[in-house]
Amino acid sequence: MRRLWLIFSQAATVALAVLFVVGTLKPQWLVRDGGGRPFTEIVSLRSATPEPVVAPGTLPFSGYNAAARAAAPAVVSVTASKPGKRNPHAQDPSFRFFFGDRVPEQVGFGSGVIVSPEGILLTNNHVIEGASEIEVRLSDGREARAEIVGTDPETDLAVLRITLDKLPAITLGRLDALQVGDVVLAIGNPFNVGQTVTSGIVSALGRQGLGLSTFESFVQTDAAINPGNSGGALVDVRGHLVGINTAIFSRSGGSLGIGFAIPVDVAQQVMEGVLRDGQVTRGWIGVEPRDLTPEFAENFKLPIRSGALITGVLQDGPASKGGVRPGDVVTAVAGQPVANTAQLLHRVAALKPGSETAIGLQRGSQQLQVTLTVGQRPKQQLPRR
């Protein structure tokens, strides 16, 4: 028995030695698997651990934490206290005996964005409208009372100021660099639960006709925006501000993936106007426009299919003095084409009051151009949301 074991061990040793020599010098002699690869290669592939392929100078994707860290410190919570409605029984002596003369206050919550180390904030006008006191809380726990520098109800924006040291400020982004499909983050204080970051993409640009404000050109996003997010920041993947969150489309009060933000270029224009003049100054020509419909163009045999139809002209207004008549179709303002009512409002609003501008008109089959002196748009009283 011992002799047999010795013979077996010697034979196994010789066989392994031959296999090693053949595998080293002539690996193609070894038996192949069904896939056609040498046995030694298969063993090598199965035992090797593949290294992740990373392009030179780049890092593996690790989320959007860098953008959130850059922008979040400049996003604040806004608490607006507003006088409540007086009880109709307040004059009743018995009621006053039990409840006194105090009028309960209504408290609203929203968000804001610090855009300057000097304490300038942007938020929505509807967040602070009618407020008697406005409290701001930073992400680092500091609190301050804010004063209203100015408001612009026609874009639903408000400019506030707080006085604190070493304030973080967000970096303003570029709207012209934003495209549909780009990733964005919404930062704010939804339902007053505390600062929250949600992510999504840009769903659309230049949304109009929603009835939220006079001048609409919203950035639409599916990043979750809920009550309390109003006035907060919509930022890109670098943490740069691209919009001020302002509204959601919802049947339940919660986010359904359709949110709207005021573009950063509009917010910057409003802020600069308020800080410079105390108000936003816009051009005005004194007309009542509506979109030109194909039916109207066909009935009146107009050679155009787009523009802003003038249905009314204010007597002694800039347009009236310049020769604009009801029934005219505005096709251009200061050389820029006008395709609808929204474009007409934006083109005219961008004009400087007191300046002269050329208005392109289609009057029947005749093309005209008139020159008029731009007036200043009067303040509009918009209904509360």
Image (tube, rainbow, N blue to C red):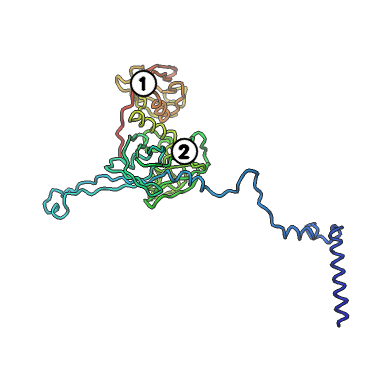
- Work out whether mark 1 precedes mark 2 in sequence or the reverse, and give the earlier one: 2
- The percent position of residue 360, horizontal first and vertical second, equals 43, 20
Q: Quadrant of the N terminus?
A: bottom right
- Indicate the quadrant where residue 156 lies: top left
What percent of the width, then of the height, locates residue 80?
31, 45
Residue drawn at (52%, 39%) of the image = 180
Q: In the rendering, at what x and y percent does residue 300 appear?
A: 42, 23
Q: Gap in Å between the C-alphas at discs 1 and 2?
A: 34 Å
Amino acid at pointer 1: Val
Name the foreground residue: 237 vs 147: 147
Residue 211 visible (yes or no): no
Q: Is residue 22 above or below residue 250?
A: below
Where is 32 relative to 309, above or below?
below
Percent across and percent down for residue 302 are 44, 22
Crowd class of label 2 (few under 14; some 14 to 19; many from 20; radius 10 Å): some
Q: What kind of element bears circle 2?
A: loop
The quadrant of the picture occupied by the C terminus is: top left
- Looking at the picture, does residue 9 appear above or below residue 64? below
Determine whether, in the image, residue 363 is placed left or right of residue 41: left
Residue toward you, 351 or 305 = 351
Circle on res. 374: 1
Q: Could you classify mark 1 by the number of other residues whose Cα lies within 10 Å: few (under 14), some (14-19), or many (20 or more)?
A: many
- Residue at image point 39% right, 21% down: 328
Dot 2 amino acid type: Thr
Question: What is the secondary structure assignment of the residue under circle 1?
Answer: loop
The disc placed on residue 171 is: 2
